[in-house]
Image (spheres, rainbow, N blue to C red):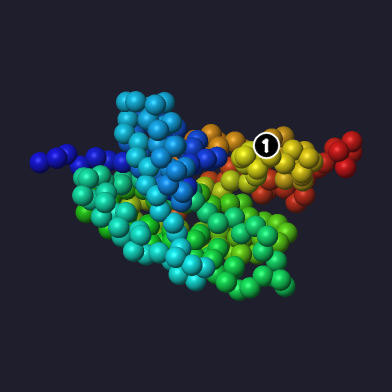
Amino acid sequence: MNEIKKTVLVTGACKNTGVAIVEKFAQKGRDIVFTGRNENEVRGAERIYNEKFPNVKITGYTINSLTDENTVDEQAVYDMFEYLDRHNIFIETVILNAADQGLGITAFENPISDFVRVINTNMVWNYCISTEAAKRMKEKGGGNIIFINSNTAYRAIPDRIAYSASKGGQLGMMRAMARDFGKYNIRVNAILPGMIKTDRWEKNPEFYKNVPSKYTPLGDVAVGEDVADAAWYFAAHGRNTTGAELVVDGGNTIQLYPIIPPQNQ
């Protein structure tokens, strides 16, 4: 009989923070399944990961959250977990990193379908993945579900109503899952990054040079590795931690407003 492999599932891991999370867990010797929406990007990332980490198994899986703005692709999630079952892969830790950023949506101009799209991806799709994973965790003695959330669940930013709403709702869902799944030794937690130095930071230097969120109490914003470290804590060290929020934003959430140096105002 084939041994069941304990594996980490990381959604949205072809670039940016998802890459840092995959690399953190690979460095720790964990086998990984990661997802992306574009087949070519998934295969390219899979090749790079396996060349960099030959001692662990890293598998890419192409999946999209929606069939259209109003419909979550439930069947795609069921198919993914059936694929994992067939290959004797047990997802012990789920890291829900993929998200619809909700960019360019304004309340007075965009159709309601744009709002629904963000809610469907960031809440409903993640609910579907979490519950499918939790069914297996329940049978195998426990596991971890980790939401990569956002400090915008508490601190609104301009023209991001759908995104903030989805992240606030996601935290409520996280706490309710932690309550309901705890009896099965399934821990459910959330990481709340602020601004992260992603490829958007590199592509728009003039915008990010003096953006207010840059001026944190610690004097810097997060990189992907900071979020990955938080995910590793929840997965590997937080034995008695569930329903918790770990903020990784340089202290932005605690300040009433950023202190911008006069020369940068």
Q: What residue lies at 70% left-to-right and 57% top-to-bottom?
A: 157
Q: 102 or 263, which is in the foreground?
A: 102
Q: In which quarter of the image is the N terminus?
A: top left
Q: What residue lies at 31% left-to-right and 41% top-to-bottom?
A: 7
Q: How many labels does the image show?
A: 1
| Residue, far left | 1
Is 151 rendered above or below residue 71?
above
- 249 horizontally vs 61: left or right: right
| Residue, far front | 40
Q: Quadrant of the C terminus?
A: top right
Amino acid type of disc 1? Answer: Glu
- 208 horizontally vs 117: left or right: right
**Residue 259 coordinates in the image, percent (x, y):** 81, 42
Is 18 rendered above or below residue 243?
above
**Element type where label 1 sits in the image:** helix
Q: 221 or 57, which is in the foreground?
A: 57
Q: 70 or 136, which is in the foreground?
A: 70
Residue topped by disc 1: 202
Q: How crowded is mark 1: few (under 14 residues within 10 Å), some or many (20 or more)?
A: few
Q: What residue lies at 58% left-to-right and 46% top-to-bottom?
A: 193
> Which of the 4 quarters of the picture holds residue 108?
bottom right
**Residue 124 coordinates in the image, percent (x, y):** 45, 65
> Which of the 4 quarters of the picture holds residue 126?
bottom left
Whether residue 48 appears in this view of the structure is yes
**Residue 253 coordinates in the image, percent (x, y):** 66, 49
Is 117 rendered above or below residue 262?
below
Q: What residue lies at 26% left-to-right and 46% top-to-bottom?
A: 90
**Residue 11 coordinates in the image, percent (x, y):** 44, 48
Whether residue 250 appears in this view of the structure is no
